Amino acid sequence: NAGVTQTPKFRILKIGQSMTLQCAQDMNHNYMYWYRQDPGMGLKLIYYSVGAGITDKGEVPNGYNVSRSTTEDFPLRLELAAPSQTSVYFCASSPSGGGGNEQFFGPGTRLTVL
Amino acid sequence: QKEVEQNSGPLSVPEGAIASLNCTYSDRGSQSFFWYRQYSGKSPELIMFIYSNGDKEDGRFTAQLNKASQYVSLLIRDSQPSDSATYLCAVNGWGNKLVFGAGTILRVKS
């Protein structure tokens, strides 16, 4: 089991560019999450999904979009990148709702917007 | 807005001592509580979870929960330099999502 994988590990974007952060899990988990973590801060939920075809906004969704066409994949799209989106992005998955089950995290993507 | 509060630290303890990390939460309806450890530049990993009032022990780690006071803590006995990390408290929120605190930096000095 690879667990939760994320690509790329690092990326530098110019203001206004777009990109997709990839996330995949091979644990057959229904729930998947995208978080961002700014220096010295906790994790803020961007979007989450309870299964293929179902997504919903988290705490900080502005400037991002997601899709979930399969159980395994949960890509995060950044449109018109802004410096405020400089952060470390973590994808996570859990077998059911996070309230009762452990969330497994990917290694993260460090994004810088200049 | 559901909130989870932690002292940012750093909390410095000598090797072999007990480290005590604390967390308070605002949502009285919260049912599940998690402690994650995050090494610098790495992703969070689960250390312990607790659902019921009282203590839960796992090796050198003890989680304590007091729902009446809306308080959860993590004790690390016989602290080791390898325990130096940021410890994130997380509480289940609305819709089974987790709300994370900002984390406490722990430094264990040898």
Image (spheres, helix red, strand yellow):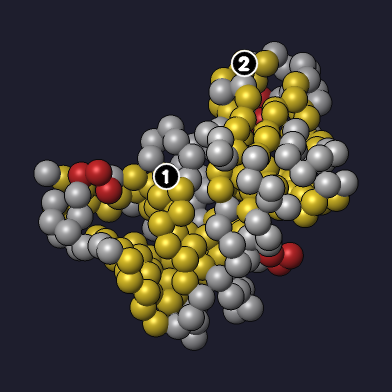
Q: Position of residue A76 (x, y in %)?
A: 75, 33
Mark 1–mark 2 Cα distance, whole angstroms, equals 24 Å
Query: For residue B57, what is the image quadrant?
Result: bottom left
Instruction: Between residue B109 and residue A20, name the one nearer to us.
Output: A20
Q: Which residue is mark 2?
A: A12
Residue shown at 65% from the left, 40% from the top: A26
Q: Position of residue B110 (x, y in %)?
A: 12, 44
Q: Position of residue A21 (x, y in %)?
A: 70, 28
Instruction: Between residue B41 and residue B71, name the one nearer to us.
Output: B41
- SS of the residue under disc 2: strand
The chain that hosts pointer 2 is A
Quarter holding the C terminus of chain A is top right
Q: Position of residue B63 (x, y in %)?
A: 37, 70
Residue shown at 78% from the left, 20% from the top: A18
Q: Which residue is mark 1?
A: B38
**Relative to B56, residue B92 above or below:** above
Is residue A58 rendered to the left or right of residue B110? Answer: right
Residue shown at 77% from the left, 16% from the top: A17
Crowd rating for badge 1 (residues with CA inside 10 Å; few <14, some 14–19, many 20+): many
Residue shown at 58% from the left, 75% from the top: B31
Quarter holding the N terminus of chain A is top right
The chain that hosts pointer 1 is B
- SS of the residue under disc 1: strand
Farthest residue, direction bottom: B68
Query: For residue A92, what is the image quadrant?
Result: top right
- Name which residue type carries label 2: Ile
- Name which residue type carries label 1: Gln
Crowd rating for badge 2 (residues with CA inside 10 Å; few <14, some 14–19, many 20+): few
**Relative to A94, residue B82 above or below:** above
Q: How many marks?
A: 2
